[in-house]
Image (cartoon, rainbow, N blue to C red):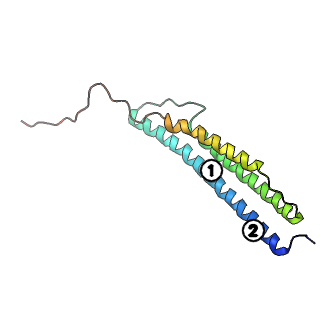
Amino acid sequence: MSRIPKIDRQREHQANERTFLAWLRTSISLIGFGFAIARFGLFMRQLNVAITQQEPLVNPIFNSENLGTVFVVFGIVAIALAAWRYNQVFWEIERADYRPHRLPVWIMTGVVIILGVLSLPLLLLRNTVFPPPSSTPNQPQSRHLR
């Protein structure tokens, strides 16, 4: 028989499940953000082509599509790690030898900080969508009827 009273084990299992669901929500958010970042970058490039009739210069490595893909992959990895951690904690609760581990929290925090820092250049150093103004101003032409 377990050394923990049944009601306490139940509460611990429920807390473990809530923690897993929080990681699940975080993973879904990362996947959603990644998809949005990747698709919005593609949309902006297509809009630039439609307006300027020129293909914009895009860094082949550091662009919004690749960053969005990294977010999606990280979201998938995060949910896999969360499921593994949930199962590990489940059995620790059952054996009454649960010990919290801080390393996964620090790793996830570090990766999210790195992804956030990598997002900054895409926000701050983006290509302009509209062409630069020409030296002669374009003024609307009106037809004068005489």
Element class at badge 1? helix
**Residue 134 percent location from the top left of the image:** 32, 27
Give the camera-side residue of 64 and 87: 87
Give the camera-side residue of 103 and 141: 103
Element class at badge 2? helix
Q: Note whether 105 is above or below 11 in the view shown.
A: above
Q: Quadrant of the N terminus?
A: bottom right
The amino acid on which the numbered mark 1 sits, given as a three-letter code, is Leu
Which mark lies nearer to you, 2 or 1? 2
Q: Note whether 7 is above or below 30 in the view shown.
A: below
What distance separates the C-alpha of mark 2 from that of mark 1?
Answer: 24 Å
Q: Quadrant of residue 9?
A: bottom right
Residue under label 2: 14
Residue at the image position 26 percent from the left and 26 percent from the top: 136
The amino acid on which the numbered mark 2 sits, given as a three-letter code, is Gln
Give the camera-side residue of 99 and 145: 99
Residue under label 1: 30
- Residue located farthest toward the top when viewing the structure as drawn: 135
**Residue 127 percent location from the top left of the image:** 46, 33
Evaluate if marks 2 and 1 touch, with contact meaning CB atoms under 8 Å apart. no
Neighbourhood count class around disc 1 (C-alpha, 10 Å): few under 14, some 14–19, many 20 upward = many
Residue 105: mark: none
**Residue 65 percent location from the top left of the image:** 57, 40
Residue at the image position 75 percent from the left and 68 percent from the top: 14
